[in-house]
Image (spheres, coloured by chain):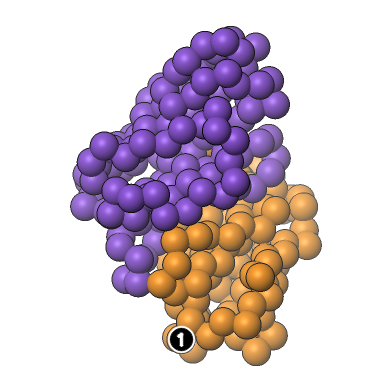
Amino acid sequence: DTEVTQTPKHLVMGMTNKKSLKCEQHMGHRAMYWYKQKAKKPPELMFVYSYEKLSINESVPSRFSPECPNSSLLNLHLHALQPEDSALYLCASSQVVGADTEAFFGQGTRLTVV
Amino acid sequence: AQTVTQSQPEMSVQEAETVTLSCTYDTSENNYYLFWYKQPPSRQMILVIRQEAYKQQNATENRFSVNFQKAAKSFSLKISDSQLGDTAMYFCAFMRRFDDKIIFGKGTRLHILP
């Protein structure tokens, strides 16, 4: 199993809504990532979890709240988003830091904030 | 800081032709990885090929090969016998060893024409 599964695939939410994006992998990877990708742009790193602990937060606004409840799951909680937060949100995972590694990506959640 | 530059925003080639995508990077590190990722319209980022900086031999994966010039900090991707399914956005990416962060170039949109 070399899959990273993201749900939902599409999400439309209002600026006052609270929603969550979910990501799951069963490859035994201990590093998990959230990226944001705007149209025709490269992915931008938001958060990195290493061994279920937040290791990198790229100065992301607090309306985005990540959570890693266990080694297989990664959530991104959304609250009071702005229309400019509309983007493709990609989850990725990789083996522990330091190993010969590559990142496996999910198909992403296309988020639209209205 | 590390940077990745892809100087070709868009390219088109005929099916079955060979195409080369350019990538240069800047780093003072000695231990790192370089990647080419493909992102088709389906949105999923797919690893095409990976190169470890400490390996002098250029990586190959079927029709995909790289020309890794460490001194010149160049990492180009060659696609041989191009196919319609190769149509996608291609991102060159860099990651330091013992690090969690992948740095992407701005991408090259490749169109394979029938």
Give coordinates of residue A104: x percent, y percent. 39, 50
Chain that is purple in the image? A
- Is residue A49 visible in this depiction of the protein? yes
Is residue A100 visible in this depiction of the protein? no
Q: Residue furthest front?
A: A62
Q: Nearer the viewer, residue B111 or B1?
A: B1
Residue A94 sits above or below residue A89 on the image = below
Residue shown at the point (30%, 63%) measured from the top left: A96
Q: In the image, B71: left or right of A55?
A: right
Q: Amino acid at mark 1?
A: Tyr
Above or below residue A87? Residue B87 is below
Judging by the rendered image, the residue that carries numbered circle 1 is: B54
Give x and y (percent) for residue A111.
Answer: 55, 23
Chain for mark 1?
Answer: B
Query: For the image shown, how many numbered marks are present on the structure?
Result: 1
Identify the secondary structure beneath mark 1: loop
- Occupied quadrant, residue A36: top right
Q: Colour in which chain B is shown?
A: orange
Relative to the observer, which residue lies in front, A62 or A50?
A62
Quadrant housing the C terminus of chain A? top right
- Residue B114 vs B24, above or below: the answer is above
Q: Which residue is located at x 70 percent, y 40 percent?
A: A40
User: What residue sits 43% from the left and 50% below the top?
Assistant: A48
- Nearest the viewer among A20 and A4 is A20
Return the x and y of residue B4 as percentages of the image width and height: 67, 65
Coordinates of residue B88 in the picture (x, y in percent)? 60, 45
Q: Residue at x 35, y 72 (%)?
A: A98
